[in-house]
Amino acid sequence: MPSVRSRGLRWLRRLLVAALLITLCFVIWCSIELVRARADLSSARGHLIAAQASISGDSSLLDRELVSAGASARSARQSLDRPPLRGLARLPWIGDPIDSTKSIADVLDQVANTALPPAAEAVRTLTTRPLLDAGRIDVNAIRGSQPALGTAASATADALRQAQQIRARTWLGPVNRARSELVDQLTRLDSTLRSARTATDLAPGMLGADRKRTYLVGLQNNAEARGTGGLVGGLVLFSTDRGRITLDRVVKDLALPPGRGLDLGADYRNLYGTTDPTQIWQNSNQSPHFPYAARIWRSLARQLTGVTADVVIGIDPPGLRSILSATGPITLDDGETATADNIVQLTESAAYARFDTDRSGRKTYLADIAEATFDRITSGRFQIKALAEAFGDATKNGRIAMWSQVPAEQAELAATDLGHEVPYGPGPYANVVVNNSYASKLDYYLSRAITYRRGACADTTQEILVDVTLRSDVPDTRLSPEVLGTFLPGGGTLPPRSNKLTVSLYSSWGSQLTALTVDGVSVGLGRGTELGHPAHYTVVTLPPGKPVTVQFALTVPRSDADLVVPVQPLTNPADVRVLGQPCR
């Protein structure tokens, strides 16, 4: 007969087995609901991505995707609200991923129901009939899209704030990734809608809805580097009047008699004044702050043409490449075709080989390209969505900049990538800029690798090293004198195919330079201030095919914010890296 002890052990084993089975069933039940919820969330996000892609296309497809996205998000929420997960969600730490997943589902449902539908309505308003037709933009359609676009932008901003407030780290990795992907997706959508809202707010006035507006476009050539991109090689003047866009003049000869320049303040004069930047086109945009260049161009253009521009735009050949990718190629009078694939090479390299020392012929050729591009844009014979996307891409990469003499318009432009401003204010900031100092066009072959290394933190400061490695891969072929360069202050020339560059670093308010070296050797430097930012610079000779490294060592005010590192738009994109962490 079994003892009491053995009977007790058997019952204990049975209880343990039963408890394990119950726990296992509970875990399986919870896992099934979690897997179902995760699948629904993935489906909802996929439908939202498809809905975004179809906003300007098939409206019936858009409606289906939005309905499906909302249904999937609500299904995920229902799975999470069922008894097993609802109970677990109340437990500290254990319930964190469930609570986060609920919040993700709520945000996805909100986007599907309150953000994307008005965005789609705005697009339909803009595309019901051609927005650009025979040189006229439909200003009324733009105005009609403003209410819906404002609603979409506000709803998306609210959804992004809610997504950012969701717990970023739980013990369940897939939930953390889902939250991160949602924030990234909404950040992109928020940026797109904010830019579109700004554009539709500004467009009617800037298109001459209330009065005629005059535009000045500076055509920059990155083959000779300047702070805002490249040397100004020509101008386009056009006007807008109640939506109609008219080409007024293409200016290819920028020669000016001596005149009176603008006064941009003592700091500006200290940094750039020895080169007469406010009186000479070639030196007018050494500063990376586009509003300075715009004001100078406006002043010089008024002296040259008698026209006072309301708006100033800067654009470079890579910006034209983006535009031609949307509009299609242009054909010149002689039958030559310029396309998105060859426009940079034609304007920054081939034109110099073709015309050699015939400067007038080259300027006429580039003016013809500018006029043909303008005609192509105003023809409207392309998808307006493609042009908007191309314009946005070029703006994001610094290829197009804009300034308005109307303060309210300029305030809005300054808050976007179009402003191309050096910010006035404290905060972590580092901006490496090169200016060609040899009147060469060798920067077409220039490559840049820029590394910002955040180092040790002290009580009030942090150390930063900035390495700028430059390399000029000039081909060993005949190049015209215009390309090779001829100018050195005080006379003289460099060894064949060598280049001379001024390398500048604009840093955070209150920063201090502790060392400046070129290839490890201490060198002399110039210094100044731009909009409160300390500016330090040195001049380097860049031989063909051999890298040169400039290193700036700094102490900067301690901050827990990310480092802002603008990238100067030149022919070849820079390889930019930011290493290390802010001081937490």
Image: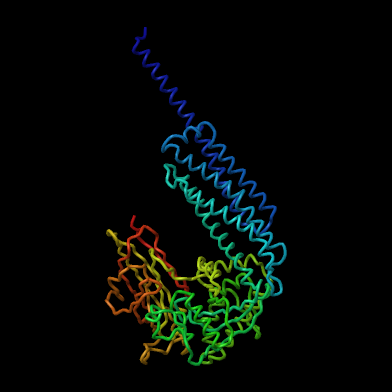
Tell me if 460 is positioned left or right of 288 in this view.
Answer: left
* Camera-side residue of 368 and 258: 258
Q: Is residue 346 above or below residue 355?
A: above
The tally of labels here is 0
Tell me if 339 is positioned left or right of 575 in this view.
Answer: right
Q: Is residue 61 above or below residue 212?
A: above
Residue farthest to the top? 1
| Quadrant of image for the C terminus | bottom left
Relative image position of residue 359 (x, y in whole percent) = 53, 90
Quarter of the rendering containing residue 204: bottom right
Point 61% across, 53% down: residue? 116
Quarter of the rendering containing residue 474: bottom left
Relative image position of residue 47 (x, y in whole percent) = 60, 50
| Quadrant of image for the N terminus | top left
Point 30% across, 64% down: residue? 463
Point 44% across, 47% down: residue? 168
Relative image position of residue 514 (x, y in whole percent) = 27, 70
* Camera-side residue of 494 and 297: 297
